[in-house]
Image: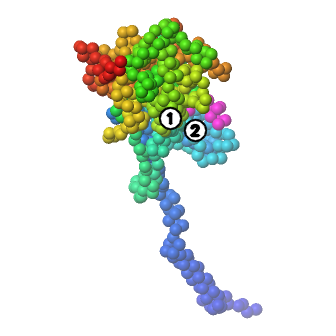
Amino acid sequence: MTKKKSQTPSQMHIPVWRYYLVLGACLSMFAGLGVRAAWIQVIDNDFLKSQGENRTVRYQGITSHRGIITDRNGVELASSIPIKSLWVNPSRLFEEQEKYTDFFETTAWAQLASLVDMSVMELNSWLGDPRRNKKQRVWLKRQLEPSRSAIIRRLKIPGINLEQESRRYYPTAEVTAHLVGFTDIDEKGISGIEKAYDERLQSENGRRKIIKDRKGNPIEQVDIIETAQSGEDLALSIDIRIQTSAYQYLKAAVKRVNAKAGSVVVLDIDTGEVLAMANQPSYNPNNNKTRVANSTRNRAMTDVFEPGSTVKPLTAISALTSGKYYSNSKIDTSPGLIRVGGRWVRDGRNHGVMSVSDVIKKSSNVGVTRIALNLTDDEFLESFYKVGFGVDNATGFPGESTGHLNIRKNWSAIEKATLSFGYGLDVSALQLAKAYAVLGGLGTSRPVSLLKVQGPIVGQQVIDPYIARQVIGMMEQVVTTGGTGKKAQVAGYRVSGKTGTSRKTIVGVGGYGDDYFAVFAGVAPVRNPRLAIVVVIDDPQGDAYYGGDVAAPVFAEVMEHALRTLNIAPDVTDKKELIVASLEKNYD
């Protein structure tokens, strides 16, 4: 049998079509790869660029700060300080738990729990809450103390991150708390100036594009996407030196007489600026635990009271403006009481026949009642309206009270009588201070400002200057020997003011109880009044509850410190001077 010879590869026949098929397939594959590469890299390269940038380019926030609040001399009252806040990535933490079954039992985890004021069990329960455990970012602790954030950083726990934020800080704490107010944890104004001017104080954070290396360290800033805008700085009208002394003197007085509360307002007569506004009780805005409802409101602007005899000078102004009375006009107050509409109006004793000046000096209820009843309603009420009673001071402060003038058609004679000595109307301490600033400004009314004002302030003449001078002279006698407010005297300065002691209404019942408001309001120095101050003590305890005993001494302390702080020259001379004597004409 003949064997077939085996063929060598070179002798084997390969169909030509297979060769070209394989060659075409290879060429098509390379052509496709080339086209795809060109498409991706040249024509449609956004995908690769975005993927590359996701690994190297990051967007980073640019932190800006809320505006700074200062006093009129630039002393900081509120500012934002940098601070770290802690957030976690729950998903990442659970991944670590899957890798290391005892991850949530490590010493580092126990330290973290302690640093955020939790037990390990509480922290694990918090983390396992369905509302959080699938999220990529959850706040764990906002605004950490620097020492705690430093320790957390050293723990290097995966999924635990610290982020730069800012927290509002109040250097003067409780001294300016009621006026400045405070913000929430996100620095949004909640009360006081912080709320009233929140839009101006607010900042806007920015964004920038940066390039990071493989370790996540920033190596280059590419572009600013959004520019950060810091909040506007505000200069308040208050002088922290006067504010501090007012706060200290008020606090001591409230404690001394065991009062429920108290307020002090100091106004610059020439500009209408509030140089001090203090209240008791107070609180520390840096500590949330001290923020109880009874202590956080600015009583000088939000609370109202019946001002009592401090409005008697307004009755005197109405009398002199009407032309029916002069400062030395005689009024018979005998026998020390008068019956009006079936009710009695009384004085502490029978003063007999008195001049209008003496009615103010001795604070005679019968005297101002006789004056008021002899005036028409329009004549009588004119001065009350002109000093701004019944309307707010348009400061924009949240919760500012308008007060209340209980005026109606066909009101009774007794209502008119009681209004003449400060009952039947409600005012705030700031409104009363504004009224006395009008008197001290010789009848010129200027808008009240909580912000520092620039340039001259144009006021409106609402009371005749000559009449205002006469009434200032009448009130100067109040603080002299024999007057009801002699404890308001200030060494080296002539003071003009008026005491007030009003009964408090019984809330929910009506009528008056045995609790009082002790008030003193006045201006100084008399020769050229610069400051108007009002002191209100709410419910002083003990036998000494009159305005002349309780509020007048605080007025004297605050006024003396303020006058000397502002370097206002004394106006006392060796020769006794009373403006009322030098300006009065003889109308016999």
**Residue 330 location, x and y as percent?**
42, 15
- The residue drawn where x is 41% and y is 44% is 232
Location of residue 226 by image quarter: bottom left
Q: Which mark is residue 392?
A: 1
Q: Which mark is residue 140?
A: 2
Q: Is residue 293 above or below residue 362?
A: below
**Dot 1 lies on which element?**
loop
- The residue drawn where x is 55% and y is 75% is 36
In the picture, the quarter occupied by the C terminus is top left
Q: Is residue 352 above or below residue 524?
A: above
**Residue 108 location, x and y as percent?**
55, 34
**Residue 573 location, x and y as percent?**
24, 16
- The residue drawn where x is 35% and y is 30% is 465
- Does the magenta portion include 493? no
The stretch in magenta equals 116-126
Distance in Å between CA atoms under marks 1 and 2 = 44 Å
